[in-house]
Amino acid sequence: VRTEPGPSTLPDEGSDEKAMGSLGPAAAGVYVHVPFCRRRCPYCDFAFEVRPADPRYAPALLAEMAARRGELSCAPATLSFGGGTPSALPAADLAALVAGARSILALPADAEVSLELNPEDVLAAPAAAALAPGAPGGGVEGPALPAALAAAGFSRASLGVQSFDDGVLRWLGRAHDAAGARASVRACVEAGLRTAVDLIVGVPGEPAARLARDVDELLALGATHVSAYLLTVEPETPLVQLIAQQRRAPVDDDAQAAAYEELQRLLAERGLTQYEVSSYSIPGEESRHNRIYWQGGAYLGLGPSAHSMRPLEDGSVLRRHTRARFDAWLADPAGAARDEEVLPPAAAFLEAVAFGLRDLGRGVSLEELAARHHLGDARSCLRVRAALLALGDDVLEGADGRLRLSARGARFADRAARAVLAADDDRR
Ligand code: SF4
C-alpha cells in the first residue's frame, strides 16, 4: 500500500461484521510476487527488476510452493499475484501456477484468485500467443488474455489504470494510453473477471474534471472496485530527479488534499463504500485477500521479495521474507525464506491494532486482539486505547467497544498507527 487517500463514506458504526466480510483470524492467503517490469515508472519504489519475464520463474515458484506448503496451517482462502508486473508472465505460466496452488496448497475452487495487470499487457498479441495449447482463446489476437485467465481460474483482475486522462498518464510515465486503459477494463469485465481499477490521485496539473471523468468511466466500463493512491514522491526514485530538473512540477499538498476529498465524494455519490483506507467497492466486491492482511490472518509470500506472516501458539508472530533479487531467489527457491524474525506477543498485538484500524468497517477490538496474542495484562489495552482516543475525532469508539477510524481519521491512518506503536515505547 503506497499511501492513503482520505475517506469517503464510512460504514455506520456497529456494522454487521458478516456484511462487511469478516474473515476471522483463521483465514489464510497466499501472495505470489512477480518481480518483472518492462520499464520503470518514475514514481515507483516497489520491488521490481526491469527485465523480461524469465522462463525459469514459474518452475522455481512451484518448487518454492512445494517446499513451503507446511507453513500454511489451513487451506488458503485467497491467491493473489502482485509485483512488479504479473501480467508480464505468459498466460500459460500463470495458469500453471494456479493449477499448482490447487494441487500443492489445496487452494479451494471458490478461493479468490486475483492478479495485477498492466493495461498494455491485456490486449498484447504476445500474451495471447503464449497461451497454453488448448486453452480458451489460445492463439487468438485481441482480448484473449482475460478470457484465458478466467479459464485458468482467476476470479479477479486489478488493473493499473491510474487514470483515463492521457495527460496524467504521460506525467506518470505510464506505458499505456487512455484508449488502452478503457479497452483493458472492458476486456476484463467481458471475460467475467471481477475488475478493480487503480487510480493515482493528486497529480500536479491534472484537469479539474479529471477525477469525475475517471470515476464515471471506470464505473461505466463495469469496474466494481477502486484502489486510490495519493501520488507520493518517494526517495531515490527518478521522479525526485525529474522534479529537481523542473521536468515535472512538485507535488502540492493542498491540491492533493482537495483531490482526495473530491474523489471520496464522487465515489460515495456513486454508491461505493470505502472499506479500507485506500480501497472502495460496490458492496460485496471487496478484496478478500487484502482483508486478510488487515484482519491479522496468516499469509504465505512466495517469489522474490515476498513477506509471510504466521501467528504462533504462544501469541507471537513469525515473519519471513524471501531474498529480494530475482537471481538470488532463483539460486535456491526452496530455501528462499531464510530471513525471519519472531515478533513477541506485545509487539505483535500493537502491529495487529495498527493494521486492523485500516479495516474501516470492522475496526479493532483491543480485548480480542490482546487475547489472540495471549496478553493477560489489561494495561496493554488501556495504554493503546488512551493513545488512540487522544487523537480526538480521528478515532470513534462504538457501542460494541470496537475502535474505528473516523472519516477524518482514515485520512491520517499513518498517524494513528504511529500512536499505537508509540504506546509500545511508553511501555519500555
Ligand atoms: S508502477 Fe508497476 S509497472 Fe511501473 S515500475 Fe512499478 S511495479 Fe513496475
Image: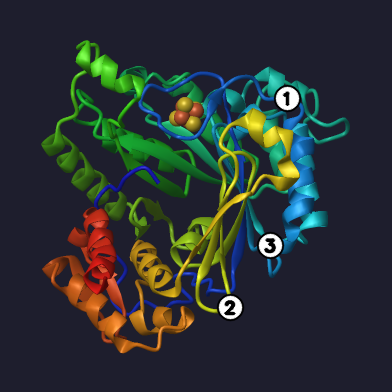
Residue 260 location (% of width, % of height)? 22, 44
Q: Which mark is residue 313?
A: 2
Residue 408 vs 219, above or below: the answer is below
Residue annotated with mark 3:
71
User: Quarter of the image holding residue 165?
Assistant: top left
Question: Given this view, does label 2 or label 1 mark the residue nearer the observer?
Answer: 2
- N-terminal of the two: label 2 or label 3? 3
User: Quarter of the image holding residue 331?
Assistant: top right
Residue annotated with mark 1:
128
Q: Is residue 134 left or right of residue 187?
A: right
Marks 2 and 1, how far apart at CA: 46 Å
Q: Amino acid at mark 3?
A: Glu
**In the structure shown, which secondary structural element does the residue marked by tag 3 occupy?**
helix
Residue 366 location (% of width, % of height)? 34, 79
Q: Is residue 131 left or right of residue 11?
A: right
Question: Given this view, does label 3 or label 1 mark the residue nearer the observer?
Answer: 3
Disc 2 and disc 1 in contact, CB within 8 angstroms? no
